Image (spheres, helix red, strand yellow):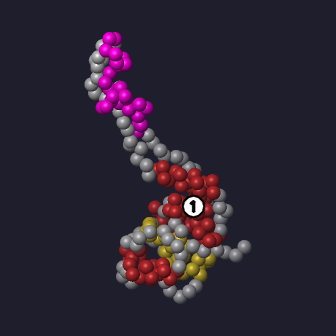
């Protein structure tokens, strides 16, 4: 099987060979699903809450006597059926986090990257392609590549010129290798990785 390759954008047309262990790995949908679900759950704060009838203030005495009024018997105006009363089965703060083994998380990232590599939606970009921040140049580069959006651009933290060029584009997410998630890669219709960030991405995904 030939080694996977990705085009180098923004310069002379050439292709760069990729690490087979990372970009030609077996795609395991169930691992990708587990990783994405865990990452999305980790973003949830879990602070939603409401008061039950036992937590609402007031309502200690019966609103009317037990018999003789013609109305249904009631014990407190803080019951759920009253305005201002408590909530029946209220939501309480909870932790939504899910545990995913490190090996499974790395395998999921390899699968997501391999899917882009096999589909031809993975491109590389040289860090010196931008002498100064230029959103216009970034737009022209993506349009010349011709891939669909949304696009995720992965650059190293010290590539400020590259980051500033892409970060204001609509439907483009710019991130660094340390913060790259499987959910980002799955969400993207196309993926752009700088040459400086490529070894870092491969290091995160390597088994």
Q: Which of the 4 quarters of the picture holds residue 92?
A: top left
Up the image or down, 66 lies above or below 173; here it is: above
Q: Position of residue 21 (x, y in %)?
A: 64, 67
Up the image or down, 89 lies above or below 75; here it is: below
Residue 61 visible, this angle? yes
Residue 79 among magenta residues: yes
User: In the image, 81: left or right of 122?
Assistant: left
Q: What secondary structure is found at the residue carrying circle 1?
A: helix
Q: Position of residue 2 (x, y in %)?
A: 70, 76
Give the extent of the magenta segment.
67-93
In which quadrant is the N terminus drawn? bottom right
Q: Residue at x 32, y 26 (%)?
A: 78
> Closer to the camera, 88 or 178?
88
Q: Main secondary structure of the magenta part?
A: loop
Q: Which of the 4 quarters of the picture holds residue 73?
A: top left
Q: Position of residue 90 (x, y in %)?
A: 41, 34
Q: Which of the 4 quarters of the picture holds residue 3?
A: bottom right
In which quadrant is the C terminus drawn? bottom right
């Amino acid at each position: 099987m030939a080694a996977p390759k990705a085009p180098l954008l923004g310069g002379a047309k050439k292709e760069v060979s990729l690490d087979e262990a990372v970009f030609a790995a077996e795609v395991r949908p169930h691992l990708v699903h587990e990783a994405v679900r865990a990452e999305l759950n980790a973003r949830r704060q879990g602070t939603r809450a409401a008061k039950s009838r036992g937590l609402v203030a007031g309502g200690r005495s019966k609103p009317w006597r037990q018999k003789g009024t013609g109305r249904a018997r009631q014990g407190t105006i803080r019951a759920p059926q009253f305005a201002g009363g408590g909530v029946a089965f209220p939501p309480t703060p909870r932790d939504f986090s899910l545990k995913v083994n490190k090996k499974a998380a790395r395998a999921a990232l390899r699968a997501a990257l391999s899917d882009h590599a096999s589909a031809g939606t993975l491109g590389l970009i040289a860090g010196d392609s931008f002498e100064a921040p230029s959103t216009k140049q970034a737009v022209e580069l993506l349009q010349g590549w011709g891939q669909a959006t949304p696009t995720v651009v992965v650059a190293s933290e010290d590539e400020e010129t590259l980051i500033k060029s892409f970060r204001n584009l609509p439907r483009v997410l710019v991130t660094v290798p340390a913060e790259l998630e499987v959910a980002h890669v799955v969400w993207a219709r196309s993926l752009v990785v700088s040459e400086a960030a490529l070894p870092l991405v491969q290091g995160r995904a390597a088994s």
